[in-house]
Image (tube, rainbow, N blue to C red):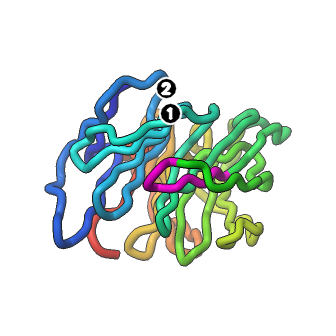
């Protein structure tokens, strides 16, 4: 699968001294699985997670590095020179919770693996991750018919802090992507139509929109 970064899937944030004109970015190459998430280093690089491939490109989409990764690497985020990727090695969306949820940490320059953190509290499978105030927030799968979504909060050392509930109504396979921007959380979901959820910093639901951010979502411009 080849991919396009655009307003319909994600938005690239760049430094104010060398702004990237807003528009589509093609990730060069073909990949076996579909895009799970994107993030940037707020400067020169875009990172793309393709389930079993982690790809680093420049701002024009030319590949700088790529590595094979375990199935299933999901959405990712950038913080302090590192990439944090939500990973599930078990089953997604299982009511019995047969997931195997992790966060893998990579060096953003080299894509070397730096750490692997268990996040087994993510009961239905870790699929997405965002960062806010040095805490990490992991989202993921959801069994059919469950009328709320869950966000699992961890501190900077990946000690479990809290499980937050979003009264979102059911979304197909839970939440795929997450980012915190302009004081609010944004969550991309599958479905027909695909759904974008917006909450405040405390996960109070502010909006539910028919808009596709299920393959990645990144803030644009200053916070």
The residue lying at 50 percent from left, 44 percent from top is 189
Which residue appears farthest toward the left when viewing the image?
A: 21
The residue lying at 47 percent from left, 50 percent from top is 110
- Nearest to N terminus: mark 1 or mark 2: 2
Left or right: residue 146 compared with residue 67: right
In percent of width and height, residue 144 lies at 69, 36
Left or right: residue 49 compared with residue 202: left
Q: Please determine whether, in this image, residue 75 is positioned above or below residue 162.
A: above
In percent of width and height, residue 131 lies at 53, 66
Is residue 149 shown to the viewer in this render?
Answer: yes
Q: Are marks 1 and 2 in contact (CB under 8 Å)?
A: yes
In percent of width and height, residue 166 lies at 62, 61
> Label 2: few (<14), some or many (≥20) within 10 Å?
some
Which residue appears farthest toward the right when viewing the image?
A: 96
Magenta stretch in the rendered image: 103-111
Quadrant of the drawing holding the N terminus: top left
Number of callouts in the render?
Answer: 2
The residue lying at 25 percent from left, 36 percent from top is 26
Q: Please determine whether, in this image, residue 220 is positioned above or below residue 116.
A: below
The mark lying in front, picked from 1 and 2, is 1
From the image, tell me which residue sits under label 2: 33
Badge 2 element: loop
Q: CA distance from mark 1 to mark 2?
A: 8 Å
From the image, tell me which residue sits under label 1: 53
The residue lying at 54 percent from left, 32 percent from top is 68
Badge 1 element: strand
In percent of width and height, residue 156 lies at 65, 72
């Amino acid at each position: 699968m080849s991919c396009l970064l655009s307003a319909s899937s994600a938005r690239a944030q760049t430094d104010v001294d060398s702004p990237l004109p807003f528009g589509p970015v093609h990730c060069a190459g073909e990949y076996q699985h579909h895009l799970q998430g994107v993030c940037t280093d707020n400067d020169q690089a875009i990172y793309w997670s393709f389930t079993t491939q982690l790809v680093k490109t420049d701002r024009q989409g030319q590949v700088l590095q790529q590595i094979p990764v375990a199935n299933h690497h999901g959405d990712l985020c950038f913080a302090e020179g590192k990439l944090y990727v939500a990973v599930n090695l078990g089953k997604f969306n299982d009511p019995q919770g047969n997931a195997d949820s992790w966060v893998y940490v990579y060096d953003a320059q080299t894509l070397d693996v730096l750490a692997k953190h268990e996040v087994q509290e993510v009961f239905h499978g870790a699929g997405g991750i965002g960062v806010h105030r040095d805490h990490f927030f992991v989202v993921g799968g959801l069994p059919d018919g469950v009328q709320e979504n869950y966000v699992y909060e961890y501190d900077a050392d990946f000690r479990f802090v809290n499980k937050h509930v979003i009264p979102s109504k059911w979304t197909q396979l839970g939440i795929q992507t997450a980012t915190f921007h302009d004081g609010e959380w944004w969550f991309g979901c599958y479905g027909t139509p695909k759904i974008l959820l917006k909450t405040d910093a405390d996960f109070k639901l502010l909006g539910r929109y028919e808009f596709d951010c299920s393959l990645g979502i990144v803030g644009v411009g200053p916070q």
